[in-house]
Amino acid sequence: MSFTILARGISGGTGSGELLTSSEAISFLSGVDPETGVIIESGHPLEGKSVEGKVLAFPYGKGSTVGSYVIYALRKNGKAPSAIINIEAETIIAVGAIIADIPMVDKPEKPIDEIPEGSFVTVNGDSGEIIIE
């Protein structure tokens, strides 16, 4: 049984994958290795986990504007998430998703942390839909 959560589309397209959720913000500059896709920020709840091919859900981004280019580098290296869900999009993550062609939504109508980690999720950045299988 699947269900849909409505959200606001930020970056168009559709991406699917296993849900990887963080309750904490993510800094892509010095927080995610653009060569491997692994979160390297010391003490982060997702430290040591890869974002590659995942639907990455986190509250919002933090850090330098260079983080947008790290997201782009992840795409160029084949290590990017398949989609991004934020509670509140901010410029760094939104620009990164747009230039890297990663579907992105924010402001989901229901809390994402209620979706079990590892669920298969599809994000449609054009329609603003999050579909949970």
Image (spheres, grey):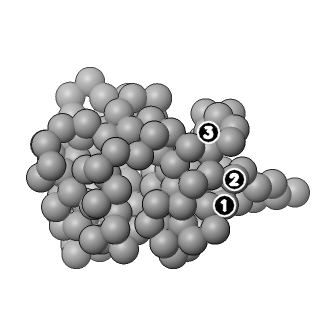
* Kind of residue indicated by mark 2: Leu
Q: Which mark is residue 6?
A: 2
Q: Which residue is nearer to you in this view: 89 or 15? A: 89
Disc 3 target residue:
112
* Kind of residue indicated by mark 3: Ile
**Separation of residues labelled 2 and 1 (CA atoms):** 5 Å
- Residue drawn at x 25%, y 36% is 62
Task: Specify which label sits upstream in the sequence, 2 or 1.
Answer: 2
Whether residues under marks 2 and 3 lie with C-beta atoms below 8 angstroms apart, the answer is no
Horizontal relation, residue 103 to residue 127: left or right: left
Q: Characterize the local packing of mark 2: few (<14), some (14-19) or many (20 or more) Cα atoms within 10 angstroms.
A: some
- Residue drawn at x 34%, y 45% is 90
Q: SS for tag 2?
A: strand
Q: Which residue is nearer to you in this view: 60 or 44? A: 60
Whether residues under marks 2 and 1 lie with C-beta atoms below 8 angstroms apart, the answer is yes
Residue that lies at the very extreme toward the right in this rendered image: 1
Q: Characterize the local packing of mark 3: few (<14), some (14-19) or many (20 or more) Cα atoms within 10 angstroms.
A: many
Task: Specify which label sits upstream in the sequence, 2 or 3.
Answer: 2
The reply to whether residue 20 is in sight is no
* Kind of residue indicated by mark 1: Glu
Q: Which mark is residue 114?
A: none
